[in-house]
Amino acid sequence: MRAMRELQTLNPSTDTASNAQILFLVLNASSLTLLPVSIFMYRAQQGAADPTLVFLPILIATSASTLTGLLSVAWMQRLKLWDPVGLAYLGGGALLLGGLLAFLATLSAAALAAVSSLVGNLALFGVIVAFLVAGAVRRVPVYEAFIEGAKQGFEVARDLLPYLVAMLCAVGVLRASGALGYALDGIRWAVHGLGLNTDFVAALPTALVKPFSGSAARAMLIETMRHYGVDSFPALVAATMQGSTETTFYVLAVYYGAVGIRRVRHTVGCALLADLAGVVASIAVCTWFFGGR
């Protein structure tokens, strides 16, 4: 919220999104999730033997989502990503991701699950330790800084509340209308007609409501876990989708509304394209890792 307000001070228009604001929000909405702690928590609450099993699938899917968002905005705004700095970032990220995928391609399905679990646990523990070490080295009072951040969080939550209520009402209307069920039946029919496995369709409610509401998507994820089993294929795909997509319309409504932006230009199209990439990547990578279990 503070970043959006700072960008608005540089915006020559009071009601039209600037290129910088669009890029900022699309990258925000494409949700590069490095440590999906909330997904681990949901899986643990539902009795998963290994809550961190989906760590690597989420990392790969969220990388696809963020890259798609960045490239789509770059295309619309004619950004020069091919200068030395841009190539260094993109090339370095591509090499790291490519090396990870090449290594994972040599492993069996059981080994993939084991590696994902190990890396997830190490990352979770490592991030906590890194914060504490960095605070000690730089002589930052970590606890006091945390408390100050929490206070600012309450102020942000107060500003977001009216927009959150509006989005939750819209999601409630969507669910009560039955439109979601009809959409899933249509997708299942189309996928079956193509001769493909329809197991992943049961995970799509999470993906379909996620652009509107994180709480609704969380409810769909937990419902899928309870109905099919926390370690079933649909539940694993839904968890990966939850971790690699974002509440696009909520993000746009809240952050643009807070600074008075009414004309969002190509923000919605680029953000939804990133979400679609995250969903497709989630299905593909879970099929690779878990083999339609």
Image (cartoon, grey):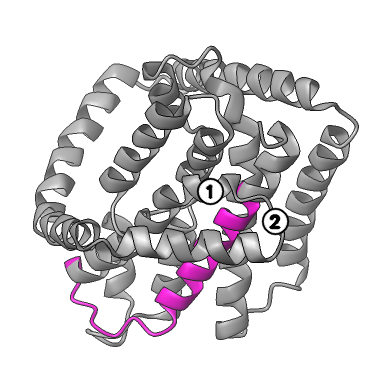
Local SS, label 1: loop
Q: Residue at x 64, y 52 (%)?
A: 281
As drawn, the label of residue 32 is 1
Is 259 situated above or below 235? below
Q: Which residues are magenta?
A: 258-282
Quadrant for the N terminus, please.
bottom left
Identify which amino acid the numbered label 1 is placed on: Leu
Q: Is residue 261 magenta?
A: yes
The x, y position of residue 269, in whole percent, is 46, 77
Quadrant for the C terminus, please.
top right
How packed mark 1 is, by other alpha carbons closer than 10 Å (few <14, some 14-19, many 20 or more), is: many
Q: CA distance from mark 2 to mark 1?
A: 29 Å
Q: Which is in the foreground here, disc 2 or disc 1?
A: 2
Residues at circles 2 and 1 in contact by the CB criterion of under 8 Å: no
Q: Nearer the viewer, residue 204 or 163?
A: 204
The quadrant holding residue 9 is: bottom left
Tell me, yes or no, if residue 81 can be seen here: yes
How many numbered discs? 2
The x, y position of residue 105, in whole percent, is 86, 37
The x, y position of residue 18, in whole percent, is 38, 80
The x, y position of residue 117, in whole percent, is 64, 19
Tell me, yes or no, if residue 211 can be seen here: no
Q: Residue at x 23, y 82 (%)?
A: 262
Q: Residue at x 47, y 66 (%)?
A: 186
